[in-house]
Structures are given as structure tokens and as C-alpha cells.
Image: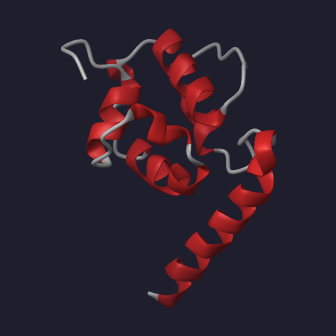
Amino acid sequence: MGKNKGPLEVIARLLGMDYISDLRNPVYLPAVRCVLNFMDISKFSADEWSHAANYILGNEKTYATAAEAVAGILDRDSLSVQAGGKRLQNYVWGKYMEERTEV
């Protein structure tokens, strides 16, 4: 990760990931969403957030603002259906909610 860090690099670093590509793994989506709740989204442009959202979610959507792109990531129904992503997302979300209720 170089000097010019974008949202992908920052999120990956905050989650202790060695590779940005790990952010595309739906298993980590709840953790990514958690980190987003604590980030100052104004530090990056709408284009940077749009790229980050499309990279994480595996889609090609155009977001008008940074807030819209972040909201796209936070939306639990936004994960692409590629390679069974929707089914995996629902499974992970269910496990995440189970753990939250057990605590």
C-alpha cells in the first residue's frame, strides 16, 4: 500500500488485511460495514468511494456522491449475485446477527 491511500487501502489496513482483494470476499462484508461506520467519508472523493463500492460489491454502479457509494456498501442487499454471492451474503448476515444476539 503506497503513499496515496484510498478508501480500499484504509479499510483493508483497519481490518488487518494483507491484500486489498480480501475486501471482495463476502465473508468480510460485515467487518467492512463496521469499519465504514467509523470512517470520515469526506476524506475521499465521490469517485474514490464509487470505485471502492464497485470493487467491494463486484458491480458497475454509478454513485453520484460519496455518501451514496458508502450507503451502497452498507445496504445488506447490495452484494452482487455473482458466484452465489447473495446466498453467501444471507448466510454470513444470519451468522452475524446470531452472534450479536448471543452477546
Residue 69: in sight, yes or no? no
Quadrant of residue 58 in the image? top right
Q: Nearer the viewer, residue 83 or 55?
A: 83
Expressed as whole percent of the image width and height from the top left, the position of residue 74 reads 59, 44
Q: Residue furthest left?
A: 3
Where residue 81 appears, x then y in whole percent? 81, 42
Total number of numbered labels? 0
Quarter occupied by residue 14: top left
Please state if 94 lies on the left or on the right of 30 as rendered. Answer: right
Image quarter where the C terminus lies is: bottom left
Q: Is residue 75 above or below residue 97?
A: above
The N terminus lies in quadrant:
top left
Q: Nearer the viewer, residue 52 or 63?
A: 52
Residue 33 percent location from the top left of the image = 50, 48
Most foreground residue, 61 or 67: 61
Nearer the observer, 4 or 69 = 4
Look at 68% across and 51% down and name the residue there.
76
Task: Determine if residue 11 is in view.
Answer: yes
Identify which residue is drawn at 57% across, 34% down.
56
State whether residue 28 is above or below residue 43.
below
Relative height, residue 38 to residue 49 (above, below): below
Residue in the picture at 55% in, 84% down: 101
> Residue 19, image x and y in percent?
36, 36
- The residue that appears at 79% across and 58% down in the rendered structure is 87
The type of colouring in the image is secondary structure
Q: Is residue 98 above or below residue 15?
A: below
